[in-house]
Image (cartoon, rainbow, N blue to C red):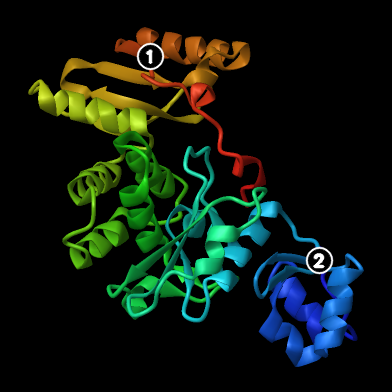
Amino acid sequence: MRAPAEDDSDLDWLLFDQSGVITYRQALIFLSPAAVRHRVASGRWRRVCTGVFLAGPAASPFDQHVWVAVLASGPGAILAGLAAARTAGLRGRWRRDAIDVLVPATRKAPELLRRLPLDLPAVKVRRTSALPDADRQRGRPDRTTMPRAVVDAAQWAPDDDEARTVVVSACQQRLVRPAEILAVTDRMPRARRRGLVVATATDAAGGAGSLAEVDLVRLCRRHRLPTPDLQRKRADATGRTRYLDAYWGQFHLHAEVDGSHHTEPAQWEADMRRQNDIWIAGDRILRSRQRWSEAARPRSPLSSAAP
């Protein structure tokens, strides 16, 4: 969406800030009721639901979806969960495409959200009395902080695997520190999957950079095997710094857990060269395939619009 010029109207700037979404009350600040009706009747604006309009383009459909969800939820509503994390930059493919919004516990979920058009994702309005200022963040739109968004996304995920993936991905992408996630869980003793989130964040703090590495550490603990050092740094034959998934120094043994991209020819050749370097240096390496493939996971309808 093109940024307005300096001499454009305040209405243009508001639409830019809100990705082309506006409420009826906001529109009346700049236009008469008749002017609003004319824009809708002429097709310039589209009524999404009662009191909310699409009045312009946006950088992505996802941007408009989250603004519709927050504005339609009324005063005090803020973006939460996976949608809040994605707005803050979290990348990935996710099976859950509903947009979560938090409202104060004293409010009821607005009836109008049950009548959203079929081309918009579902909106889940959740009431809460546990939202301290430390978990709020000003933004476009207002949302929970990344640590709170990750914890909420994990507890609302469709299964444990996706919950752990959210936690690991946020840490691996340097969007949040494990300690910040643990601080949120301390404030939310009754959060769903709290133990799983704590364990996953703790593993991420120990160096796990993917769900596969978290699974490897859990497997070692379950069978009482030594826990490896994760993301071991080493220099290859050309002097470039490389990171290996897991390393047991006392055994001179490396383990690599390969995702689906490792089957691509260029990546496979690079893996073999790196493996040869390790063997020549006197160590040994074990390779394992990830137990699920990113490419095989169902793709969210919103994934192509990720910010």
Secondary structure at badge 2 equals: loop
Residue 264's place in the image compared with 31, above or below, is above
- The residue wearing badge 1 is 278
> From the image, which quarter does the N terminus lie in?
bottom right
Other residues around mark 1 within 10 Å, as few (<14) / some (14–19) / many (≥20): some
Query: For residue 56, which numbered disc appears in the image?
Result: 2
Residue 80 image position (x, y, % from top left) = 44, 62
Residue 48 image position (x, y, % from top left) = 69, 63
Q: Is residue 9 visible?
A: no
Check disc 1 and give the amino acid type: Ile
Check disc 2 and give the amino acid type: Gly
Secondary structure at badge 1 equals: helix
> Position of 238 compared to 134: left or right?
right
Q: Are marks 2 and 1 in contact (CB under 8 Å)?
A: no
Residue 141 image position (x, y, % from top left) = 57, 71
Quarter of image, res 233: top left
Foreground residue among 252 and 10? 10
Residue 283's place in the image compared with 19, above or below, is above
Instruction: Measure the C-alpha gap from mark 2 to mark 1.
Output: 56 Å
Q: Is residue 284 visible?
A: yes
Residue 279's place in the image compared with 19, above or below, is above
Foreground residue among 272 and 300? 300
What residue appears at the point 56 percent right and 33 percent down from the top-left corner?
299
In the image, which is nearer the foreground, mark 2 or mark 1? 2
Residue 90's place in the image compared with 141, above or below, is above
Residue 147 image position (x, y, % from top left) = 36, 60
> Position of 21 compared to 227: left or right?
right
